[in-house]
Image (spheres, rainbow, N blue to C red):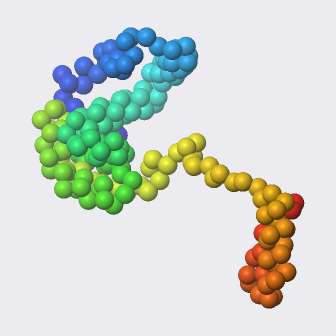
Amino acid sequence: MIRATRHKASADSSHGARPEHPRSHGRQTPAEDRRSGKAALALSWLDGDRQGATVLATARNMLQAQEAMAAVLPETLAHACRVARMDRQQLTLAVPSAAYASKLRQLAPRIVQHLNQRGWVLQDIRVQVQAGLFRDPAHARQRDVMPLDNAALQAFDDLRASLAPGPLASAVEALLQHHRL
């Protein structure tokens, strides 16, 4: 249940038209059209169910809090910070590192004051560090691996033959076995 709420006059304004992206000029790509059609279907399905409507209202409330909070924060902190939870008169924010958390804790009174001036009823901000907050496996850096050619393999083979038995010789042997498969 959400108790950190906005006053009625402010809450009704969220049901208006969504602001356009500054570079969209009112046009959508075909992919965006398909996504928005699917999104509209999902939203209408959620709105039709009592429990779904509650989830949708919670999501909208959290997004509005995210936007209001971002307006008072420095840009880099605003991009790193996410509204994680709203419970009673407490807002929980998630950040990816302790450095962001420290700065956010310093700014907490200013954020509460800003949000209260804009119709939110908040008394406290809690900060959580979530280390994997912005990790995206799709953008994980791929290693550039070049296979060893015959000359390199021969050079490692010669090195192995010249080494005394031990950990280095074992490592070179393992490398050769791996690359000859």
Q: Is 2 drawn above or below residue 170 in the view shown?
A: above
Q: Position of residue 124 (x, y in %)?
A: 21, 50
Q: Is residue 35 left or right of residue 171?
A: left
Is residue 86 or residue 114 the one in the foreground? 114
Q: Quadrant of residue 168?
A: bottom right
> Measuring 81% from the left and 78% from the top, which residue is drawn there?
160
> Measuring 69% from the left and 54% from the top, which residue is drawn there?
145
> Measuring 84% from the left and 60% from the top, which residue is drawn there?
150
Q: Position of residue 73 (x, y in %)?
A: 22, 43
The residue most toward the top is: 26
Q: Is 2 drawn above or below residue 179 in the view shown?
A: above
Q: Quadrant of residue 65?
A: top left
Q: Position of residue 99 (x, y in %)?
A: 31, 59
Q: Is 143 drawn above or below residue 120 in the view shown?
A: below
Q: Is residue 5 visible?
A: no
Q: Is 114 drawn above or below residue 106 in the view shown?
A: above
Is residue 39 or residue 86 the one in the foreground? 39
Q: How many marks?
A: 0
Q: Quadrant of the C terminus?
A: bottom right
Q: Position of residue 157 (x, y in %)?
A: 84, 73
Q: Quadrant of the N terminus?
A: top left
Q: Is residue 56 left or right of residue 9?
A: right
Q: Is residue 164 left or right of residue 140?
A: right
> Measuring 76% from the left and 55% from the top, which residue is drawn there?
147
Q: Is residue 64 left or right of residue 118?
A: right
Q: Is residue 76 visible?
A: yes
